[in-house]
Image (tube, grey):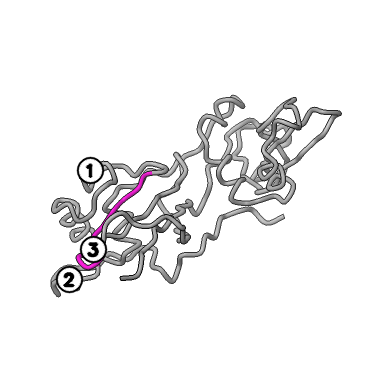
C-alpha cells in the first residue's frame, strides 16, 4: 500500500489589513495598504527592517518597523534573504500580525472573509491508513470556521462538513472538533478521505468556495 503524506493548506485573505493612521499629505486619517515590499537598512553590525505601506488615497508612504537595531548576525539568513527579495508571503505574514500593529502603535483594519488556499505537499506520512492529514497556516486576522474551510476546499456543502465533524470523520489531531470551532494557525486536521469524497444526496446544495482549481495563492498588493 502506498504511503499518503500530509498536506499543508496555506490560507491567505484576498485583502490584507490596512494600517489606519493620520496621513501627513491628506491631512486626516487614512488607510495605508501593504505594498509587499521591505526596506532594509544596514548600519555597521546593526540592521533595521521595515514593511512599506502606502496611503490608498495619495500614495504617501509609511514604514512599519519589523526589526530595529538588531545584530545582523542574529537574524535568520533565510528570512534576511526573503526581506531582500521582497517576499510577498513574508509581507503578508508580518502585515496580518495584530502584535506587529500594536508594537507600531497603529490601528489595524478588519479584513473580509474572502480568502485563497495554496496546497503544499510535505514529507510527513499520515498517521492512519484511510485518513488524510492537513496542517493549516493562516494569519490571525482571518476568522475561519472548520466547516467553512472544509466545505470550500473539499467542494462539499456546509451541511455535510458539519455532519462529518459530528461523526468524527473530520477531527483535530488532538481529538474531535466542532463545526463552529475557529481554525487555528498550525492546527492539524485528520479526515476520512472516502467519507469526504462520497457523493451527497441530490437535495443537499453545495455551497461554492475556493475550489482546487483556485489553489494558487494570489495575494492582493497595490500595484506601484
- Dots 1, 3 in contact, CB < 8 A: no
Mark 1 vs mark 2, CA separation in Å? 25 Å
In front: label 1 or label 2: 1
The residue under label 1 is: 175
For numbered disc 3, what is the local secondary structure? loop
Mark with earlier residue (1, 2): 1
Left or right of residue 4: residue 194: left
Q: Report if residue 167 lies within the magenta region.
A: no
Image location of residue 149, percent across then percent down: 33, 54
Q: Residue at x 43, y 71 (%)?
A: 213
| Residue 71 position within the rendered picture, expressed as x and y whole percent measured from the top left | 75, 27
Per the image, the residue denoted by label 2 is 200
- The answer to whether the residue labelled 3 contacts the one labelled 2, judged by CB atoms less than 8 Å apart, is yes
Quarter in which the N terminus is drawn: bottom left
**Percent coordinates x, y for residue 31 in the rendering:** 59, 40
Q: What residue sits right under mark 3 in the picture? A: 157
Is residue 190 one of those drawn in magenta?
yes
Q: CA distance from mark 1 to mark 3?
A: 23 Å
Residue 220 relative to residue 23: left or right:
left
Amino acid at each position: 500500500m502506498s504511503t499518503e503524506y500530509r498536506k499543508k493548506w496555506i490560507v491567505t485573505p484576498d485583502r490584507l489589513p490596512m494600517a489606519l493612521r493620520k496621513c501627513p499629505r491628506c491631512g486626516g486619517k487614512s488607510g495605508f495598504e501593504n505594498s509587499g515590499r521591505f526596506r532594509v537598512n544596514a548600519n555597521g553590525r546593526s540592521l533595521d527592517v521595515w514593511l512599506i505601506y502606502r496611503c490608498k488615497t495619495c500614495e504617501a508612504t509609511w514604514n512599519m518597523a519589523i526589526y530595529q537595531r538588531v545584530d545582523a548576525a542574529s537574524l535568520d539568513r533565510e528570512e534576511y534573504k526573503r526581506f531582500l527579495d521582497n517576499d510577498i508571503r513574508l509581507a503578508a505574514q508580518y502585515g496580518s500580525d495584530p502584535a506587529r500593529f500594536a508594537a507600531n502603535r497603529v490601528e489595524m483594519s478588519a479584513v473580509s472573509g474572502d480568502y485563497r488556499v495554496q496546497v503544499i505537499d510535505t514529507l510527513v506520512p499520515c498517521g492512519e491508513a484511510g485518513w488524510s492529514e492537513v496542517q493549516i497556516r493562516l494569519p490571525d486576522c482571518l476568522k475561519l470556521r472548520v466547516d467553512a474551510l472544509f466545505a470550500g476546499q473539499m467542494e462539499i456543502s456546509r451541511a455535510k462538513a458539519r455532519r462529518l465533524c459530528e461523526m468524527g470523520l473530520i477531527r483535530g489531531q488532538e481529538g474531535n472538533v466542532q463545526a463552529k470551532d475557529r481554525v487555528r494557525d498550525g492546527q492539524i486536521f485528520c479526515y476520512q478521505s472516502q467519507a469526504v469524497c462520497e457523493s451527497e444526496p441530490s437535495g443537499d446544495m453545495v455551497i461554492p468556495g475556493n475550489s482546487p482549481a483556485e489553489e494558487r495563492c494570489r495575494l492582493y498588493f497595490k500595484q506601484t
